[in-house]
Amino acid sequence: MQIHNTLTRRVEAFAPADPDRVTLYVCGPTVYNYIHIGNARTFTVFDLLARTLKRRFPKVVYVRNVTDIDDKINAAARESGVPIGAVTARFDAAFAQDMDALGLLAPDVVPYATAHIAQIIAMCEQLIASGHAYAAQGHVLFSVASFPAYGQLSRRDPDEMLAGARIEVAPYKRDAGDFVLWKPSDDSLPGWDSPWGRGRPGWHIECSAMAATHLGESIDIHGGGMDLQFPHHENEIAQSTCAHGGKVFARHWMHSGMLNLDGAKMSKSLGNTFRVHDLLQHYPSEALRYALLSGHYRQPLDWSENLIEQSIRTLDRLYATVRDLGDVAVDPATAPIPQAIEDALDDDLDTPRVLALIAGFAAAARKAVDPTERAASKAALLGAGRALNILQGDPVAWFARGNDDSDDAWIQAQIDERAAAKKNRDFARADAIRAQLANEGVVLEDTAQGVRWVRKRV
Ligand code: AMP
Ligand code: ZN
């Protein structure tokens, strides 16, 4: 299998250190809100990678963590007046539901940061003992100057990185670029006893500790979105390499491209997000999955209503083909995956080529008259779909969807949510909901009696 390695900026043959135990670590969500479709893109790409690797190697250990201690979680809990544990439990469960609905496999291990505090503290102690970190005013900081390779993944010049950090340098830092491994917690914040007083871990060290705990000191592939290259992954490399006596942390780095909305990265901080939770109430999950895989994973992907509609129409055509071959018995769960599909996946997960091949199989199936040919083309189509986990359902169920009033319920749910957002003075979110509804042809009117909506046909 050939995959692009961010470390070398080249597509390389993937050769695991131990082909009998391939190790994959992917940075998971911080659970303080519903995930958006941009997050889902990254998780869908790595789900496809894990599925593909599992066909190539006898054992693949796929770890995707959950960050359940973070200042953003603390802030969300404070704002909503709900205990921190209730926030993380709620959104962790929502995340698992979203992943399941999108047809993603559960990873082999889902570690939680809060269950690895002892390992995090031990790693901090090791880094201090080896001169790569220092304690100051209840903090533990990584000394960037102690790791000359810092910046190699994102190819940043250390001086350039420092220029950005110099604006407001915390007094406990020796160097502006030094980053936090551990920080003190006051009584209002979650904390654990440590050699440096009661405190909590920084984000970066969580992943280093969880990867080492579940996969060992060197791993085969580390993945995440492109936006995590710096500083998160750069810091993970520095921590893990220095804590493990210079051993290579991850031999292969894979980064998925950003999902954009109107040319801007979809992100919670910009407020331009579509939540998976909401989209799932409105569109078939398989169409979302198809849309997410329609572009090559390293390219940016523009999210739009049009992309979803096109994905639905394509799936309509494909399911109609499967339906028309209803007299041919093929079990999608066991139909072999055609070699051409495996070849496309081996070529740095070339999903646009996979989808083009699928369209070709469907065209051939529609033309086939001979019974053997019909059986073979249906098997090829369903086997190909299995590689991406699409086309595995019953065509009758696909075409029967949406024959209810769920649209009205969805619109009302959006209006209620917008009202709640306005109450919380989250005007960006309120505007985003209004814009999304407008996109769907639903226009809102704020009246004295409350919000009324009308459907505008265009
Ligand atoms: P976060 O919760 O922000 O740490 O993000 C969780 C995962 O989603 C990370 O792997 C991010 O790189 C990824 N991610 C965040 N925003 C986007 C986006 N707009 N497109 C693709 N992936 C994203
Ligand atoms: Zn991480």
Image (tube, grey):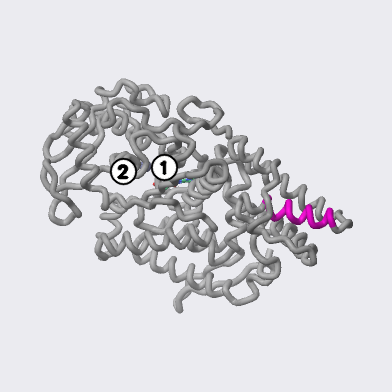
What label sits on residue 25 in the rendered view? Answer: 1
User: In front: 408, or 181?
Assistant: 181
Badge 1 local density, few (<14 within 10 Å), some, or many (20+)?
many
* Image position of 270 with respect to 434: above or below: above
Give residue 283's position: percent from left, percent from top: 59, 63
Among the 4 quarters of the image, the one containing residue 308: bottom right
Left or right of 188 in this view: 178? right
- Asked if the stretch drawn in magenta spans residue 377, the answer is yes
Q: Which residue is mark 2?
A: 213
Q: Is residue 115 left or right of residue 34?
A: left
Ligand 2 sits in quadrant? top left
User: Does the residue tagged 2 have its C-beta within 8 Å of any atom of ligand 2?
Assistant: no
Tag in front: 1 or 2: 2
Marks 1 and 2, how far apart in space? 11 Å
Tell me if residue 322 comes above or below residue 272 in the rendering. below
Horizontal and vertical percent for residue 172? Answer: 15, 33
Q: Which residues are magenta?
A: 372-384
* Residue 259 visible from this viewpoint: no
Q: Label 2 is placed on what type of residue?
A: Thr
In the image, residue 236 sits, relative to residue 119, either above or below, namely above
Instruction: Measuring from the top left, give residue 309's x and y in whole percent.
Output: 66, 57
